[in-house]
């Protein structure tokens, strides 16, 4: 009886040990990854030409955000550019803004935001913005000066010169697509070019061999990405262009 009692106690101990320790070991080996939803302010104010693709661009960014852990807040109210409000956002994205969209106080608040580690992304006419603010010109990387006409949208070839960036890793060495192709002035020599436009593939280019069309940089405290694409509504339906935008956003957010 004593022997049987010892055996029963030992058996109960084994059952108890195996039942309690296994879940604990499993819990220790499970890696739980929690990633916060990034907040992006999309600014679409226009004081000049207004692109018909803006609304489609916002719609597409919202859709992509649901799939890529970022939330979009759209505004055309320049008064949203104040220190307290901008602190809410991980990225400020100018989507085809045009001409003078910020007043002096809003400009200072936006500069403070970048200086404190905020990030900026520009799409298409973001380079047709704030010509009288040299700091913005260096931030965006270049200013729009002209584009081909009759028609203004045409097919062109682009040469992808950096495929290690998140915005270009999915592309082939040559990317051919239809869009409105900007010519630029005041190109910031410190920015890192991702894609050059091949002016031999279309008519209307004025930059020659040095014709960047997408680039990135770290500027004055923040990360910056710009792409010249996005004039047409159809641009935002292109899978490669969507991936290009997601990669630019993820770079600005510091994701890998």
Image (tube, rainbow, N blue to C red):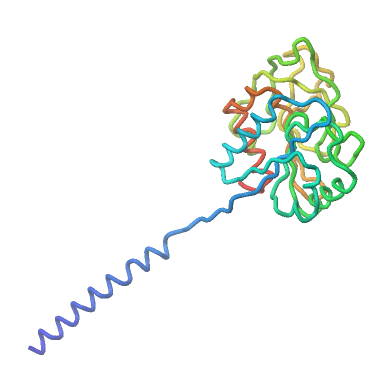
Q: Nearer the viewer, residue 104 or 245?
A: 104
Q: Nearer the viewer, residue 236 or 198?
A: 236
Counting from the top left corner in percent of width and height, residue 131 is at 89, 33
Q: Is residue 191 left or right of residue 19?
A: right
Residue found 64% across the figure and 24% down from its top: 235
Say if 248 sits above or below 179 in the image.
Answer: below
Residue at 70% in and 17% down: 156
Position in image of residue 67 (x %, y %)? 53, 41
Q: Which residue is the extreme one toward the left?
A: 1
89 over 190 or under it: above or below? below
Give coordinates of residue 93: x percent, y percent.
72, 40
User: Across the whole image, how many numbered discs are drawn on residues?
Assistant: 0
Q: Is 51 displayed left or right of 250 in the figure?
A: right
Residue 73's spot in the image, x, y percent? 67, 43
Residue at image location 66% in from the left, 41% down from the top: 249
Q: Quadrant of residue 218?
A: top right
Which quadrant of the figure has residue 21? Answer: bottom left
Residue 103 location, quadrant: top right
């Amino acid at each position: 009886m004593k022997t049987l009692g010892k055996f029963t106690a030992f058996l109960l101990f084994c059952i108890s040990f195996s039942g309690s320790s296994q879940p604990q070991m499993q819990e220790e080996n499970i890696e739980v990854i929690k990633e916060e939803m990034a907040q992006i302010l999309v600014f679409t104010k226009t004081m000049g030409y207004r692109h018909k693709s803006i609304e489609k661009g916002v719609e597409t960014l919202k859709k992509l955000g649901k799939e890529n852990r970022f939330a979009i807040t759209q505004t055309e109210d320049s008064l949203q550019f104040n220190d307290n409000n901008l602190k809410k956002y991980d990225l400020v994205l100018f989507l085809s803004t045009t001409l003078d969209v910020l007043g002096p106080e809003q400009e200072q608040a936006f500069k403070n935001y970048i200086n404190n580690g905020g990030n900026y992304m520009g799409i298409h006419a973001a380079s047709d913005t704030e010509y009288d603010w040299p700091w913005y010109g260096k931030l965006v990387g270049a200013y729009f000066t002209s584009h081909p006409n009759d028609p203004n949208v045409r097919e062109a070839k682009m040469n992808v010169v950096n495929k290690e960036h998140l915005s270009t890793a999915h592309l082939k060495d040559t990317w051919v697509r239809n869009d409105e192709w900007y010519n630029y002035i005041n190109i910031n020599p410190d920015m890192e070019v991702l894609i050059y436009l091949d002016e031999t593939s279309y008519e209307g280019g004025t930059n020659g061999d040095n014709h960047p069309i997408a680039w990135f940089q770290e500027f004055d405290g923040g990360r910056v990405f710009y792409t010249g694409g996005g004039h047409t509504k159809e641009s935002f339906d292109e899978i490669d262009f969507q991936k290009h935008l997601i990669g630019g956003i993820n770079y600005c957010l510091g994701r890998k």
